[in-house]
Amino acid sequence: MTRPPLVATLVITVLAMAVLSWPVGAAEPIVAGITNIAAAENGGQIKAFSSQRLDENGQVMPEWQVTNLIDGKHIVGNFTPADSYGWSSQSVPSDEKPEWIVFGFKDDRTHLLRRIVIDPQTDDPPVIGRWVRWFTLQVSTTTPEGPYKTVHSFLVDNRAVQQFFDFTPVEARYVRLLVTANHGSDKCVGMGEVEIYEAIVADGVIDDLIVRLENLLTELKRYRDFQLYQREQKTLEAVTKQPAPPAEAAGTTAGGGG
Ligand SMILES: [Ca+2]
């Protein structure tokens, strides 16, 4: 007898959980949709921003420009897209002087939002502390200049994985991210990609299951990418491991110190 593959097992588990946990007479659930409406390929736009990294001549560096946040390109393991390192600001953010980006959607339409996903990875390694740490989500239903109302502030881990932030559905024509802290660098702040998803009222059990399964598949793909990344890291460690230093001349005592 062969064992069912992992994906099939997970799908069956999710189906069973969904059916068993469906409360009788419950209101239709509000879930996050599956289309990233901030993506440039879906009509998403950057309407305004505080800064982007410039070279020593004051010129924009395309590989660090702000539109890299919605280009759908990600750093995966040791792979960095040659033309897209992520976005990097020109200075360090703070509560008093945040770095910020305003996002708009196709045809400047208003949407009911439910989820934001941050991929903090840029070509800067996490150890130097430049990746986004705190951001505040704000929304406007009028103009890119506001007025804005604050939805919530979120903490982003200094880890090379996409991070999901859900909130009570809120209407927005424009979304402003106030980036208020990095992970310790005194130079700048950056991140790789920002995704925004609508709130969807699941129209019954089947729709809800479809959305859950789509989300599950996305999670599985991320899990696979992460496994790949870990394998690469292990290989890298094995390859770069220094050989042990040669033993001292005979007669020297081990340890020493004192
Ligand atoms: Ca990107």
Image (cartoon, helix red, strand yellow):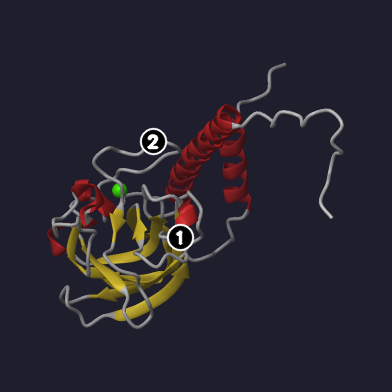
Image marks 1 and 2: residues in contact by CB distance under 8 Å: no
Question: Which image quarter is the C terminus in?
Answer: bottom right
Q: Quadrant of residue 16?
A: top right
- Left or right for 187, reference 8: left
In the foreground, 112 or 135: 135
In the foreground, 173 or 31: 173
**How far across and how far down the image is residue 92, in percent?**
34, 70
Q: Quadrant of residue 82?
A: top left
Q: Which residue is mark 2?
A: 79
**How far across and how far down the image is residue 146, in percent?**
20, 79
Disc 2 element: loop
Indicate the amino acid at tag 2: Phe
Indicate the amino acid at tag 1: Gly
The label number, if any, that marks residue 70 in the structure image:
none
Q: Residues within 10 Å of mark 2 (few under 14, many from 20)?
A: few
Disc 1 element: loop
- Left or right for 155, reference 198: right
Q: Which residue is mark 1?
A: 129
* Residue found at x 23% / y 61%: 52
* Residue found at x 30% / y 38%: 81
Label 1 – label 2 distance at C-alpha: 20 Å
* Residue found at x 58% / y 44%: 14
The reply to whether residue 168 is in sight is yes
